[in-house]
Image (tube, coloured by chain):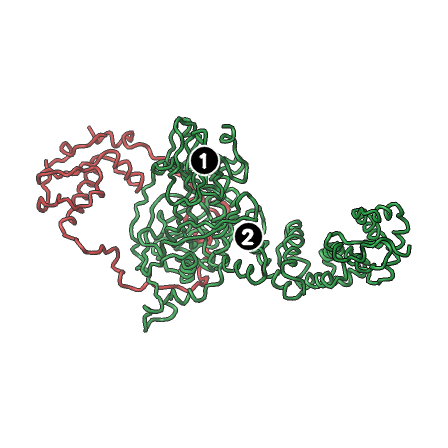
Amino acid sequence: MAAMATMVAAGCGGVWCRARQRCARWPGPGSRPFLRAQRAVVCNARGGAVSAGKSGLAPWIPVVGLEIHAQISSNSKLFSGSRVQFAAPPNSLVSFFDASLPGTLPVLNRRCVEAAVMTALALNCRINKKSLFDRKHYFYADLPAGYQITQQRVPIAVNGSLSYSLCIDNKMSQMVTKTVRIKQIQLEQDSGKSLHDDTRSQTFVDLNRAGVGLMELVMEPDMCCGEEAAAAVRELQLILQTLGSSQAVMAEGQLRVDANVSVHHPGEPYGVRTEVKNINSIRFLAKAVDYEIQRQIQELGNGGTILNETRAFDSKLGCTVPMRDKEGKQDYRFMPEPNLPPLILYDAKSLPANMNHQQVINIDWIHERLPDLPSVKREKLVEQYGILPEHSFTLLVWQQDQNCNSSQASEDGLAEFFESVVKQTQMKPKKVIGWILNDLLSYLKQHSLTVKESPVSSFLLADLLNLLEKKEISSTAAKRVLAELWKGEGKTPLETVKEHKLELLQDQKELEQICQAVIDGQENEVMAIKAGNRKVLNKLIGLVQKKTQGRSNPVLMNFSVPLCSIVLVGYTSSILKSQPSLDASAKGR
Amino acid sequence: MRVLSLGRWLRAGLVPPRGPASRHSGDRHSGHRPQAPPQGPAQVLLQKVSVEVLEHLEQLALVDFRDSEGVERLQKAIQFADQLHEVNTDGVEPMDSVLEDRCLYLREDDVTEGNCTKELLENARETVEEYFVAPPGNIPLVKLEEQKTYLQGSK
């Protein structure tokens, strides 16, 4: 059917089918609760299998697993005392150990362990009270020792979960919560950086990054498309930033994501997977995953096979290409790190009595001091202020993937800004949120500013909203005032209002006079209204507004001219109904 | 897959195995020597190292076996290490470090090192503007069979 074959262009969505003779059956793997068997299922947000339906095409189930490396936010490196800093002169932040000079030994950084424990607790992992370090061997110029110290046998934490939300149908109004299992979290070293000079056939190596602490988060392949992967990584980013264990800025390499992608038919075993690397932003992650899924389906549909290989995502072309230098399966020859004893963590029960405080990491102590996670913060905002869930998402969401050059979240502090305004104004939070998300946010985005850089402080905005709430200005006037305030000239809202003469006319008489003048000048319209055509009132109201230069509030107009011979009714019919006396035909004209 | 028999290379004939024949009991970790099938009766316990394994080892460890003598040394080393299998380790946790009972020292997160660019670069043969210079990526090794030294040894 044409319907089945069309690609549904909704975000990442697509209908992937392969022509076959038999009808599709729908057992589906048990862990996919969102299957809807009867119609075209778009992969995003609705679950695993991608449809077949009436035309008898067999469905493909894409399987996506992520491996995420998050750079730990610390002053010094994982096993040495050199500084952790982005963009420093090459090889200036390198100690003898980082350069792998003989005679040096690793010394574990306490802060890195705490960061890993915090992250593990936030992701509901089981923390291994005894974890071990191993060496992973491979040769590359940016790995001076020839091995990387990691935790392969017994990592610091296992078996966690990450919950994230997804919008259905690209609308913010319907959100569904999904979970991806975390297989393990381990501490490991970062490698240095290689800059390839292909023209002169050489590589420049900068070891500033070598030895920086990383948390590797291995996720189970519970996701099925690029959108899910992107949403999961966004939520993880937020969590890491909230905890402070990592800044998680993808553009600075503090968060690196590799995707493992495969496809298979329902009921059959998992297909061969490929690993996709070189993904530099969350948007590219979604694109890379979707491209790879499509490529595999096409390849298999044409009778080809998928190689278990590593592919790089080319962001300019929007496709994945095989990577050189990683052909064939690597044999890392894991061996225990002989220079490091096991890492022992304690909790309140097992706390040793006589040990130096500084040498002891107490999991329970850390647990008590965990900040509110984003999901909890969002719930609190919704409960406390009565705003919609999707608004709470926008208040907290991270904007990194919008090619932002600034390393600060533009929404960081938006929630705090909102709460601050709410405290200082009489306007209801439900109305305030509109001003924050529609007006303030659009200004911030337009000028690429963070909340902290906003020329309109929460105090000023609250002041302005108070004027609006007290009906001293109309909402159109308020928007004008905001535009003026944005110039950052230091004037208060009241001063701006006075300067531009934006106050609402409060003088009943003046208003009556103007209304009367308009009525006098529009005989035809008056006749029409008397005859029952209420819509013409809008024209008259418009004329009054023009005369008052926008300083009249239509509703106010209504109430301020009850005795005017012609009814100047507000826009809504409810006002019409609530003023029966105004229904009467002209009196005293 | 060519399997190299050591017979021709060893000057003194067969090397007798050390230790009892019960080495080949079923619960050995056969993963350590993927290419050696269980030998059966005691005497012929020569390890047969295939060319593939040799190539793989050379690539992983960047060791050059060079000629028959090198390979022979490898075979003997494997045999020597095989003696470990004589010990019954059922129910015993492997020890990977003599430090296993020590406390892992935790360092405070202070910056105490770095800023020695000049010293570090002194060791490098080639540097450009404070970067180390390396060849582009990993250069693939010449296949073992094509190496001249290897071919000489196998006559």
In the image, is B98 to the left or to the right of A124?
A: left
Q: Please say if A323 is above or below A447.
A: above
As drawn, is A176 to the left or to the right of A149? right
Residue on which disc 1 sits? A51
Considering every residue shown, the one lying at the far bottom of the view is A354
Coordinates of residue A239 in the picture (x, y in percent): 48, 56
- Nearest the viewer among A245 and A334 is A245
| Drawn side of residue A540 relative to residue A282, left or right | right
The chain to which mark 2 is attached is: A
Subunit under mark 1: A
**SS for tag 2?**
loop
Binning the other alpha carbons within 10 Å of mark 2 as few (below 14), some (14 to 19) or many (20 upward) gives: many
Query: Gap between marks 2 and 1, in whole Å?
Result: 32 Å
The mark nearer the N terminus, 2 or 1, is: 1
Q: Please state, as top left, top right, bottom left or bottom right, where the C terminus of chain A lies in the image.
A: bottom right
Three-letter code, disc 2: Trp
* x 46%, y 61%: residue: B111
Instruction: Please name the color used to draw chain A.
Output: green
Secondary structure state at the residue bearing disc 1 = loop
In this structure image, what is the colour of chain B?
red
Please tell me whether mark 2 or mark 1 is closer to you in this view: 1
Q: Position of residue A369 (x, y in %)?
A: 45, 66
In the rendered image, residue A551, in percent from the top left (x then y), is placed at 81, 56
Residue A285 makes an appearance in the image? no
Q: Which of the numbered marks, if any, corresponds to residue A398? A: 2
Which residue occupies the foreground of this view, A73 or A302? A302
In the displayed structure, B44 sits above or below A479; it is above
- Return the x and y of residue A336 as percentages of the image width and height: 29, 53
Q: Count up the numbered dots.
A: 2
Three-letter code, disc 1: Ser
Residue A215 visible to the viewer:
yes
Q: Which mark is residue A337?
A: none
